[in-house]
Amino acid sequence: MSEPTSPRVRVVIVDDHAMFRRGVRAELEGIGHDDVEVLGEAADVDEAVAAVASLAPDVVLLDVHLPGGGGVEVMRRSPGTPARFLALSVSDAAEDVIGTIRGGARGYVTKTITGEELVSAIRRVAEGDAVFSPRLAGFVLDAFAGAIEIASVDEDLDRLTEREREVMRLIARGYAYKEVAKELFISIKTVETHMSSVLRKLQLSSRHELTRWASDRRLL
């Protein structure tokens, strides 16, 4: 007598980079786990809200920074949905993690996660668990303990666009312009333009000052 199989976890992938969506889909569909099914994909907030409503997924893999308002906006515009949201983002900054969890996500993992780890995270979120890497869980605990002043961080970051924030964090971590361009699927010239804008808006004069600024605010 065969053992009963678990119901499939139905997933929607939300990310504005088509190449990344295809990669995640291939990883989930080709990894040998029959209990995860990708129902569809979305590239921005409007598409994501429509997909959640029409496809009724169990778990939404949600990028934090999206055209049209970001991952939090997707959750805000999906009231009453039974779907659980798992953030899958290049950002591991404290304010992104905490803001996304406050917005309603059940977990937050970064894009350095392996395929096996991602499948495990999807299953756990579908079952109602909260899933974080140890470092990101520490941010959430620190926020509840009052160790991170999110309001002051938000005030500074409000000057930057979402893409400028992504460029800022990578540059502050020591990435070369070429590496940032590859990571974010943009041109080196675009990276240079965003970097100039970041330094101007934050009134900083160099990469060294930017790294110190980001480190002081626990954004690295």
Image (cartoon, rainbow, N blue to C red):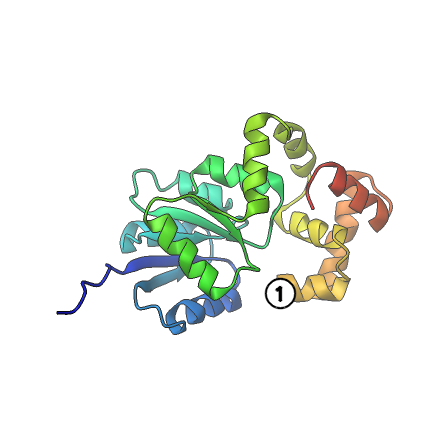
Q: Residue furthest top?
A: 146
Residue lying at 80% horizontally and 45% vertically, measured from the top left: 210
Expressed as whole percent of the image width and height from the top left, the position of residue 22 reads: 46, 69
Q: Quadrant of residue 12?
A: bottom left
Where is mark 1, residue-wise?
185
Expressed as whole percent of the image width and height from the top left, the position of residue 23 reads: 49, 69
Q: Nearer the viewer, residue 99 or 113?
A: 113
On the picture, is 31 further left or further right than 55? right
Residue lying at 51% horizontally and 63% vertically, measured from the top left: 114
Q: Residue furthest front?
A: 1
Q: Nearer the viewer, residue 124 or 96?
A: 124
Is residue 42 among what the camera can see? no
Residue lying at 36% horizontally and 46% vertically, measured from the top left: 84
On the picture, is 108 further left or further right than 10? right
Residue lying at 68% horizontally and 49% vertically, measured from the top left: 164
Q: Is residue 159 above or below residue 67?
A: above
Expressed as whole percent of the image width and height from the top left, the position of residue 152 reads: 67, 29
Q: Look at label 1 and name its amino acid.
A: Phe
| Circle 1 SS class | loop
Expressed as whole percent of the image width and height from the top left, the position of residue 133 reads: 53, 49
